[in-house]
Amino acid sequence: MWQWRQSQSNEWQNYSDIETAIIEDVYNRHGNCVELEDNVVVDLKQGLQMNNANKKKNEKAVEIRRLSTDCDDAETFRNRRQRNDRFCSAPQMEQNTNANSSLGAANWNGSQCPNLESLSYGDIMRQALEGIRQEGREIGLEKQAQWIVDHFMPVTKESFENICRACLRLYTMEGFVYRVLNTTLRDNNLSKIDTLGPLCYLLFQFNFAPELQNLCYTGRVYRSAELTPAMVSEYKQAIGSVHSWLGLTSTSRQQQIAESFPRSTVLFIIDIRNTASDAARAIANLSTYSHEDEVLIRAGRHFTIDKVESTKSSNSNINTLIYLTIE
């Protein structure tokens, strides 16, 4: 685990998982310097981070440190790390008039990517990695995207099960991939079919893979979100009706984890019935963050809004409970 801080009076901050991996690779090769995005250079010998673009301004270098992942400080930091974008962003609700279909998901499952059906899973994974490279280049994270390509390319020669496991691990990493992917799914942005379609396809198909049926999850899960009063009102008005969330939805089997994000105002309590065996997968053992005890609900899966009620919590900012059923 690699961290940085502006000064001794500031808290240590984590590099993203991809940045950490890039730094760690150079560290393990006994290298001295690591080039990151935006002219940032990490000097491993001096234990400093500098920005080459600001050298003339004589800006103070940033202190860095490496922690063993099993030390007390690392565990404390890891457990309180706030992954709001992943577990707390407001899901976009869409009405689903056909309770037997998954909104949006069909566009990313072959109807807009018919060529994928004729390819091997290894070739689809290669296309997925090339798409990530292009997406990273577009947002100025080319070095991170290149690391992903280099690190995951060997998986293209492995089994479908291992390809799925690799995709899930990549998706759970703190970085740009899950953000770009879910924004695209929620917006149903078909202009990115060529770049993100292959990865979406693999993340959809793994739900039906016989090799991974042991990950099937039914039971209760939790997700928090920061919703405005108007958004809460939409759920109240929709009680009894069927809706979908277009993006992949991260939930936890542990209520306290879902409630731990400080921006959260609403807690979704989601009951996944035995009849919904295709809806969710328990991926904690595949995740970069196993302590989050994550259950991933597939994109576009429909649910029924059962109840919305007010609540008061002394341990969080949660003021509303929304009950959903997936069946």
Image: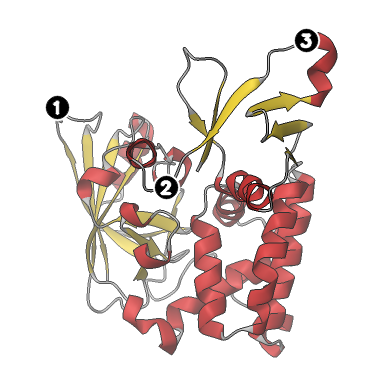
The amino acid type found where label 3 is placed reads Asn
Residue 56: in sight, yes or no? yes
Left/right placement of residue 173 relative to residue 145 reads: left
Q: Quadrant of residue 215?
A: bottom left
Label 2, secondary structure: give it. Answer: loop
The amino acid type found where label 2 is placed reads Thr
What residue sits right under mark 1 in the picture?
314
Label 3: how many Cα within 10 Å (few below 14, some 14–19, many 20+): few
Which residue corresponds to the image point at 67% horizontal and 75% vertical from the top-left? 154
Q: Is residue 111 above or below residue 131?
A: below
Q: Rounded to the nearest whole Å, what is the CA distance between mark 3 and mark 2?
A: 34 Å
Left/right placement of residue 271 relative to residue 103 reads: left
Label 3, secondary structure: give it. Answer: loop
Determine which of the numbered discs, if any, sits on residue 69 in the image: 2
**What is the basis of the colouring in this image?**
secondary structure
What residue sits right under mark 3 in the picture?
58
Is tag 1's residue or tag 3's residue first in the polypeptide sequence?
3
Is tag 1's residue or tag 2's residue first in the polypeptide sequence?
2
